[in-house]
Amino acid sequence: MKKIILHTLILAFATLLSSACSASRTVKYAPQDSGSDISGTWTVNNVSLDGFPSGYSLQNIFDIAAYEDFKGSRWELNERGTGNICLTNGVVHPIYWSVNKSGIIHTFQFKKLADNQKPKHRTSAYSLEFQDLANGKAVFKTPVSLPGGQTGYINFSFL
């Protein structure tokens, strides 16, 4: 009789423990944060400036290169949120990226990673605004704070 009670208590405890653990592993899917419509390989076919005063000198963007150097670059974005920005000069920058479609303005965010660096160890990130994608084309724009409280945009046209 003691063995039956002991086995029943062990089974009840195991059931309780297993149900408590499984609830904490539930992941809620949020479709507005999906990057599946952006994943793939994209090529920048044009880079332009909007809202910058004449004569304004724009230096290195994304801590990578001058904005002109992004024309012809390839952005390889896989569905797991990792990828690469490949410049035409052969330099490759690993990135970790995500998409946020929860507000009116959709954003593509990425962290530039050093070799074998984990995204959680990188605090700075870059953000580009975009509208819905159409026919395999996209325009992403990154806001730049200018003197006098103005905002200029660097526009990246992707194919």
Image (cartoon, helix red, strand yellow):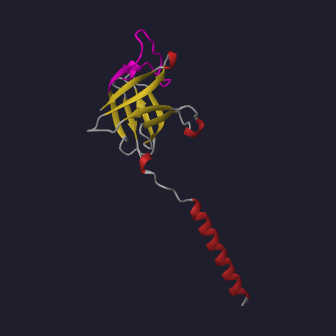
Tell me if 112 is positioned left or right of 129 in this view: right
Tell me if 56 is positioned left or right of 2 in this view: left
The magenta span reads 45-70
Q: Residue at x 43, y 18 (%)?
A: 66
Q: With respect to residue 2, does 34 lie above or below?
A: above
Q: Residue at x 37, y 25 (%)?
A: 155
Q: Residue at x 49, y 18 (%)?
A: 146
29 magenta-colored: no
Q: With respect to residue 22, does 113 lie above or below?
A: above
Tell me if 80 is positioned left or right of 115 in this view: left
Closer to the camera in the image, 18 or 86: 18
Hey, which residue is sitting farthest right in the picture?
2
Q: With respect to residue 93, does 97 lie above or below?
A: below
Identify the main secondary structure in magenta: loop
Hey, which residue is sitting farthest bottom in the picture?
1
Q: Position of residue 129 (x, y in %)?
A: 41, 33
Q: Position of residue 56 (x, y in %)?
A: 44, 11
The quadrant holding residue 14 is: bottom right
